[in-house]
Amino acid sequence: MKQATTVRVLFVCLGNICRSPTAEAVFRRDVERAGLARAFEIDSAGTTALHAGELAHHDTRACAARRGVAITHRARRFVREDLARFDHVLAMDHENLRAILLHAVDDAARAKVKMFRALEHDAPPDAEVPDPYYSGRFDHVFEICERASAALLAHLRERHGI
Ligand code: 4NP
């Protein structure tokens, strides 16, 4: 019998209340639509504990809810063990990427860490998901997450043969 594959994916931003919970929820929706919910474990975290325990930002949740996506995640801080537990760790911006890599103890850990938008079609190289916390551009963030999520799912399906 074929062994069931579980692909563990973690999205990471600064506060874990805007960008990474959006990426997590959009990716989960895409995975469910593809009938692959059992093949993935999906979570998000922040490089700081600034908002630990909180629901996502009101505007993040409202923006997603308008598009039929529920965000119920409670913020938590990224911890070193996440690099052992997850297969793919996706950073929203370069500051997040650097903060995550400080926890990477070897090449295997470093190889798991990528920019979320790295696979997105037609995105500039090294594209980031811009922080909406002060800009208020929550819709823009949601749209970016939709494009990047689709690209990531296509990549992971091919990579893991699912
Ligand atoms: P996030 O957005 O990293 O996308 O969750 C932010 C949330 C909180 C803060 C900054 C960005 N903050 O400074 O509290």
Image (cartoon, rainbow, N blue to C red):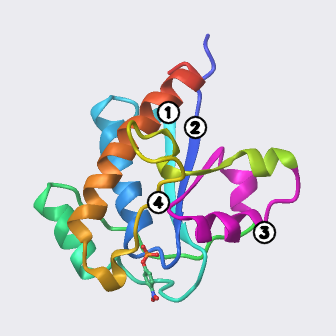
Q: Would you identify the image quadrant in which residue 25 lies?
A: bottom left
The mark nearer the N terminus, 1 or 3, is 1
**Which residue is nearer to you in this view: 70 or 99?**
99
Which mark is in front, 4 or 3?
Answer: 4
Which mark is in front, 2 or 4?
Answer: 4
Quadrant of picture, ligand 1:
bottom left
**The residue under label 3 is which amino acid type?**
Leu
Based on the picture, tell me whether residue 124 belongs to the magenta stretch.
no
Q: Residues within 10 Å of mark 3 (few under 14, many from 20)?
A: few
Do the residues under discs 3 and 2 have CB atoms within 8 angstroms? no
Which mark is in front, 1 or 4?
Answer: 4
The mark nearer the N terminus, 1 or 4, is 1
Q: Is residue 29 above or below residue 25?
A: above
> CA separation, marks 1 and 4?
27 Å
The residue tagged 4 is: 128
The residue tagged 2 is: 7
Name the residue rendered at 40%, 76% in the picture: 17
> CA separation, marks 2 and 4?
23 Å
Q: Which mark is residue 39?
A: 1
Q: Is residue 95 above or below residue 108?
A: below
Name the residue rendered at 18%, 67% in the picture: 63
